[in-house]
Amino acid sequence: QAERVAAASAAELEEAQQQLSDLEASVAELDDSNTQLESQLAAAQARLSEQDARAGEQARQHQEALAAFEMEAASYAQLLQESKAMRSAVHDKDTHVAALKTRLLEVTAELNEEREKGAGTEKALAAAQKAAAERQAALGRASAQASRDVAGK
């Protein structure tokens, strides 16, 4: 009976050793699989880092382009405001020049009326001519100022 127990124990031992050997082979396979997975994980992390770097560079370039666009848009907005201000100034000068021309015509008409009546003396005529000349000079100055204002803007 001891031989049967010894034989059974030997068989169990041999089976246990076979199972141990199988487990060691499985562990070796798992180690290989883990090594491959770790290698794949490292490669994936490297690709992800590279993609993150490229995405960061693209975001920086987009941000720079956006900042440049915003500066250009602000510049155009400023030019538009300046253009509107110049148009307004030209309109104001044109209105002023038109008023001066109207007044000059009125003074000229008054002068002509005085001449037709013959009631004015030489002194009145000279004063009217002087007033007309002053108005004409003021008109010339206003016109020149309007031209300078338009050229300066």
Image: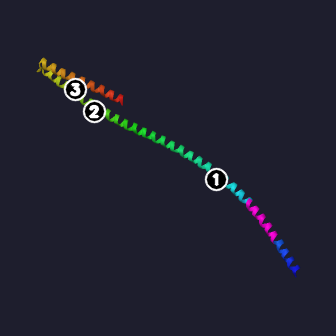
Looking at the image, tell me whether mark 2 or mark 3 is earlier in sequence order. 2
- Residue at image coords 22%, 24%: 135
- Can you name the residue that lies furthest to the top here? 122
Q: Are marks 2 and 1 in contact (CB under 8 Å)?
A: no
- Is 153 drawn above or below residue 70 in the view shown? above
- The quarter of the picture where the C terminus appears is top left
Q: Of 32 and 89, which appears nearest the observer?
A: 32
Mark 1 residue element: helix
Question: Counting other residues with Cα less than 10 Å from the Cα at mark 2, is it few (<14), some (14-19), or many (20 or more)?
Answer: few
Say which amino acid is labelled 2: Thr
Q: Of 100 and 84, which appears nearest the observer?
A: 84
Q: Label 3, on which residue?
A: 104
Q: Judge left or right: residue 32 versus residue 113.
A: right
Looking at the image, tell me whether mark 1 or mark 3 is earlier in sequence order. 1
- Image: magenta residue range: 16-31
Coordinates of residue 100 in the picture (x, y in percent)? 24, 28
Q: Of 119 and 99, which appears nearest the observer?
A: 99
Task: Indicate which disc residue 89 carries.
Answer: none
Viewer-side label of 2, 1 = 1
- The quarter of the picture where the N terminus appears is bottom right
Q: Of 116 and 5, which appears nearest the observer?
A: 5
- Can you name the residue that lies furthest to the front here? 2
Q: Label 2, on which residue?
A: 95
Say which amino acid is labelled 3: Leu
